[in-house]
Image (spheres, grey):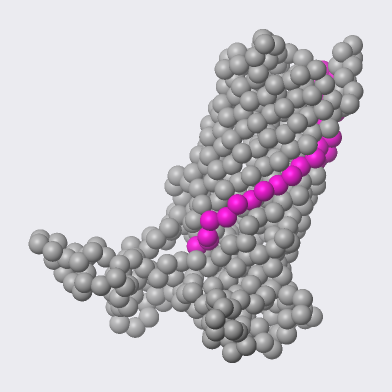
Amino acid sequence: MRSVSRSWLVASAVAPSVLALGIGAGVAYANPASTVTSLGDEPAQVFIDYSYELESSTISRERVGDPAADPNDGIPKHKEMDFHQFRHTITPRVEVGVVKDTWLSVAMPIVINQARELKLADGVDRSRLSTLEDGFLPMDGYDANDASTPPGGSMLFKGVNRHGLDQIHLGLNVAPMNQLRDDTKPTWKLGAELRLAIGGVMSFSANNPTANSAVGRGLHELRLWTSIDKRYNWTEGYFGVYYQVPLTSTSDSLYTEDLGFGVTNSRAPQLAGVWFGLETYLLDDKLTGNRISLDVGAKIDAHFEGREYTELWEMVAFAGDSGNTKIPPQLVLDSKPDQDGLQALSHPGITNVENYLQTAGSVAVRAVLGPHVRFGATFDVAWKTDHVITFADAGVDFNTCSGSNGPAGVKCETDENDVVNPGTREVNPLASPKIDQVGHRYHSEDNLGFVIGLEGQFLF
C-alpha cells in the first residue's frame, strides 16, 4: 500500500508525546511509557518533539456503466489520481507534578508547513479522467497558490500551503502503580486529555484560496488512555490503549452544519487504538546514569465512520463552491431538498468516510545523559486499509405516519415504502450523488506514510 492519511499521521507525528503522557520521578528510564512525573521528585519537565512526515495514496473511483467492464463483475473501479502530502510539525509539551505520582500536561502540536497535491496516477490519460470529465477541476489543473497559472505536467491540483495550530491538549494523569517505588509491580498509568480547538479552521474558497491557510478543524475532543510498563533487567515491555471522541465544535467549524432532514453520521469519527513495544538497553551505566536504548513498537488505530478532511477535501470544496468563477461548480449542495429549485449550499469539502484501520511500526533510539537531559530519534512507517472516502448516505427512510404523528411530522412519511423519497425531508442534503452514489464514489487505496522524528526532554 502506498499512503498514509493524516488521520494516523497526526497521532504518529506526536507519537513520542502520545507514549510519553507521563515522565519523570526518581532515576527514570529512557522509555517514556515507564516514567512518571511526580511532585517532590522531578516536578516539572519540558518536551520538544519535531517530525517530518511524508504520506501518499492512490485515489480510485467507481465508474458505473463502463463499457469495458465485465457485466458479471462488481462495480468497475479505476485509478484516477496519486495524492502526496508533506508536513513539518513541532510539539512543545510541559508536564507539572501536582501531587505524588499525579501530574498535569499541556501540549501544542504546531504545523510549521503543510503542502498537498494531486497528480495523474501512473498510466492514466488526462483526457479519460472521470474527475475532469465531470467538471470537478479545470482540464489543465488548478494551483491554489497561483490560480492564474495552470500547474502543468501531470499535476491536477495543488492545495494551499498551510501552517498553524489546531488544538491545545490539556491532560490530567495519574500512576496508581510505579515500578520505581515498588519494583515488584509494573508502572500503570491512566490519563484524560481534553483537546480544545484554538486555531483557525481550515476552509477553501475557489475564488480566493490563499485567504485561508489554517490547519484547524474546530473540534473539541476527549481522549482517554491507559498504559502498563514493566522492566526486566535489560529489556522493558509496554502496552497501552486509548479512546478518543469528538465533543463539540466551534461556531466556524465545518462540522457545525446540521441541516436536519435525512442527515446521518455528520460528526467527526471516533477513534480507538492500541500501542505496544519492547525496549532493549544497549548501555545502562548505573554510576553516571547514562543510557542508550533501542525501542521497537507498533500501533493499531480504528477510525469509525464519520466526516473527515480527506485527501480530496480541497478539491471537493473547489468543485462545490457555489460562487466559483473558475469553473461551473458541480458539487453544490441543496440545503432544502424538500423545496422546489436549488437552495444552493457550498460543499464544505469534508465527506463521509468508511470505517478503516491504520497500522504502524516504529523504531526509536533514545539516550539519557545524566539526570536532566534525554533525547531520541524515531522512524515510523504506517499503512491504512483501503476505504471509501465519499460515503454519505442518500438519506433516511422515515417510518410511516400513524395516529397523532400525522403528515406534518418531521420524522415520518405518508407513503409506506423502503426508499428515500426525492424532494422530501428524507433526503440527506450533505450527500452529493455525483460523488456519494454507488458507482461514482472515490476510494483511498495503497496507503503508505513515513515519519522521521526528533525528541528532546529536559527535567527540572
Q: Is 419 covered by the magenta stretch?
A: no
Quadrant of the rendered image containing residue 123: bottom right
Expressed as whole percent of the image width and height from the top left, the position of residue 218 reads 52, 52
Quadrant of the rendered image containing residue 299: top right
Q: In terms of depth relative to the viewer, which is nearer, 85 or 433?
A: 433
Seen in the picture, residue 181 relative to 362 is either above or below; the reply is above
Q: Is residue 460 left or right of residue 312?
A: right
Q: Is 371 covered by the magenta stretch?
A: yes
Q: Main secondary structure of the magenta part?
A: strand
- Is residue 109 visible in the rendered image? The answer is no
Expressed as whole percent of the image width and height from the top left, the position of residue 100 reads 60, 13
Residue occupying the point 45% across, 44% down = 247
Residue occupying the point 69% across, 60% down = 447
Expressed as whole percent of the image width and height from the top left, the position of residue 416 reads 21, 72
Name the residue furthest left.
403
- Is residue 128 visible in the rendered image? The answer is yes
Residue span colored magenta: 352-378
Residue occupying the point 43% across, 58% down = 266
Q: Quadrant of the N terminus?
A: bottom right
The tally of labels here is 0
Q: Quadrant of the C terminus?
A: top right
